[in-house]
């Protein structure tokens, strides 16, 4: 009988090594072509590798938890082995979304309950759009499934008690999400909003309404859910018995450490900050949400800021460059990176060719990144080739911060929280929606005047989105 060895393949662009996470087969078991045999962790993704051979598993050559280089034999298959089969369509896409009937109730009600947080979309993005089945460039010659890490279980609100006449009492923490405390002002919220609150474990009585009639909006619920997720650990845990925890530096954490160290110590950072009146952006976002063209599409202030960055790049192209020691390469296209906090760590997928997208196309592209990142299935090709990045620390309640450049880029923008503050308008103090926008640049490439003009251009769009019509 013949015996074939399966070598660890390069499942991404430039992969050099990977960790064997778990074997899906055992010696002596039959295996078919394209059957998943092992799960590996690269610097960016969890990947399921299918077998290119048919036969019987001979020997597992690498133990779970071991990191090996690309090209290392990891398993043998005996009997019935054949040459690798023609590559099948990569299984790197999720299955179909919820049934159309469930979606038709209300797109506002179909919110995810747990998963990764795309910085800029809060603890839960929009879950109604169906993803297109596409083959990503740079996919390996064998079908690959990008598998999410297990998300934390979503908080489940306590079930409502059967209604019965009772005297008015103070509300308790066991009240079901979406219920109004007895004796308090009634909560005004549409049924889809109440369902969303229930799914996310949000008590509507604790939510500050911002709707036109004092009603609670979808954004109000998501904001409360985001804040709750940030401060989820209400009780301080006791010190563990072990005096120390030792966490191996590998996978995504190792990649993040290497990238941030390289960036911080090779590119001289300079940072700028500006406070911006974002009231008209908030009004614009509200109008987009009621537009028939944007039905079922996630719309947030991040969309406007992303469009503002693309517009400002065209006016200040140097911020969209890369430094190579021998030359500065100015890119006349925008692959817009969006920093994403996932269960496995920080990743920066990017929207390819964003400069040619309409506002609606950009909104759909950002939503696609949200879905993929939440599932932990972002392929390496989606994280390669970025030209400039935005990170939204506002979803964590932060006003501003000093972002570190993504390696290979010379500009990054940080969007802070948008909240009402006193603001002087025509000599009068008025409540306005205000945010702080920060940005860092590689001073080898971007001079102070260019950095200032770029950030001023971004701020001008946030203050007046109508400028995008130019």
Image: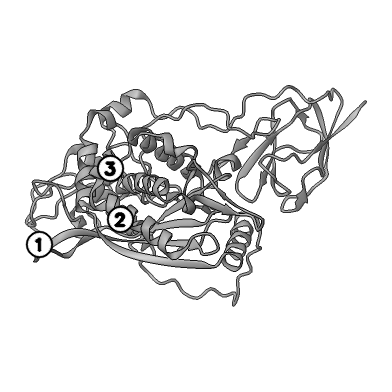
**Image quadrant in which the C terminus is located:** top left
Name the disc covering residue 196, or none: 3
Residue 301, compared with residue 265, is above or below; it is above
3 or 1: mark nearer the eye: 1
Q: Nearer the viewer, residue 378 or 321?
A: 321
Could you tell me which secondary element the residue under label 2 belongs to?
Answer: helix
Element on which disc 1 rests: loop
Give the numbered dot on residue 96.
Answer: none
Q: Residue furthest right?
A: 1
Q: Earlier in the sequence, mark 2 or mark 3?
A: 3
Q: Quadrant of the N terminus?
A: top right
Relative placement, left or right, of 310 versus 18 is: left
Q: Which residue is mark 1?
A: 426
Up the image or down, 210 lies above or below 358; here it is: below
Residue density around tag 2, few if under 14, some if 14–19, many if 20 or more, within 10 Å:
many
Measured Cα–Cα span from mark 3 to mark 1: 40 Å
First-in-chain label (3 vs 1):
3
Image height of 305 relative to 398, above or below: above
**C-alpha distance separating marks 2 and 1:** 19 Å
Q: Position of residue 415 (x, y in %)?
A: 36, 57
Q: Position of residue 10 (x, y in %)?
A: 72, 40
Place of residue 202 in the rendered image (x, y in percent of width and height, measured from the top left): 27, 52
Foreground residue among 91 and 280: 280
| Foreground: disc 2 or disc 3 | 2
Q: Nearer the viewer, residue 77 or 372?
A: 372
Q: Could you say whether the residue bearing mark 3 is in a helix, strand or loop?
A: helix
Colouring mode (rainbow / by chain / secondary structure / one colour): one colour
């Amino acid at each position: 009988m013949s015996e074939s060895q399966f070598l660890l393949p390069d499942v991404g662009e430039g992969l050099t090594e990977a960790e064997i996470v778990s074997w899906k087969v055992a010696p002596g078991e039959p295996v078919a072509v394209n059957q998943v045999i092992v799960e590996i962790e690269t610097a960016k993704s969890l990947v399921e590798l299918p077998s290119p051979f048919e036969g019987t598993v001979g020997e597992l050559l690498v133990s779970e938890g071991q990191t090996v280089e690309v090209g290392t034999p990891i398993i043998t298959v005996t009997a019935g082995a054949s040459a690798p089969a023609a590559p099948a369509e990569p299984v790197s896409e999720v299955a179909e979304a919820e049934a159309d009937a469930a979606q038709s109730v209300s797109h506002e009600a179909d919110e995810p309950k747990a998963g990764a947080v795309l910085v800029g979309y809060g603890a839960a993005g929009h879950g109604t759009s169906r993803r297109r089945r596409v083959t990503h460039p740079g996919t390996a010659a064998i079908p690959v499934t990008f598998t999410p890490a297990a998300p934390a279980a979503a908080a489940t609100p306590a079930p409502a008690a059967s209604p019965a006449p009772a005297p008015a009492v103070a509300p308790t923490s066991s009240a079901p999400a979406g219920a109004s405390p007895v004796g308090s002002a009634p909560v005004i919220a549409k049924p889809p909003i109440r369902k969303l609150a229930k799914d996310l474990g949000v008590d509507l009585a604790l939510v500050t309404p911002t709707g036109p009639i004092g009603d609670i909006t979808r954004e109000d619920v998501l904001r409360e859910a985001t804040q709750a997720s940030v401060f989820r650990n209400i009780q301080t845990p006791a010190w563990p018995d072990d005096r120390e925890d030792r966490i191996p530096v590998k996978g995504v954490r190792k990649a993040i450490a290497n990238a941030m160290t390289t960036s911080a110590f090779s590119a001289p950072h300079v940072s700028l900050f500006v406070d911006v009146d974002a009231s008209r952006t908030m009004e614009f976002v509200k109008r987009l949400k009621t537009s028939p063209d944007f039905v079922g599409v996630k719309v947030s202030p991040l969309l406007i800021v992303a469009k503002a960055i693309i517009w400002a790049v065209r006016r200040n192209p140097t911020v969209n460059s890369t430094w190579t020691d021998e030359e500065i390469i100015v890119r006349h296209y925008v692959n817009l990176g969006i920093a994403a906090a996932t269960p496995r760590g920080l990743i920066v997928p990017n929207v390819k060719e964003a400069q040619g997208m309409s506002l609606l196309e950009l909104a759909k592209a950002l939503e696609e990144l949200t879905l993929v990142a939440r599932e932990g299935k972002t392929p390496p090709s989606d994280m390669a080739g970025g030209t400039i990045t935005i990170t939204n620390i506002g979803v964590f309640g932060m006003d501003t911060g000093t972002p570190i450049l993504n390696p290979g880029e010379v500009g990054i923008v940080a969007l802070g929280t948008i909240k009402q503050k006193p603001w002087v308008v025509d000599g009068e103090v008025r409540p306005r929606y205000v945010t702080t926008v920060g940005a860092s640049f590689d001073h080898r490439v971007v001079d102070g005047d260019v950095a200032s003009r770029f950030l001023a251009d971004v701020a001008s769009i946030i203050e007046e989105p109508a400028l995008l019509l130019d």
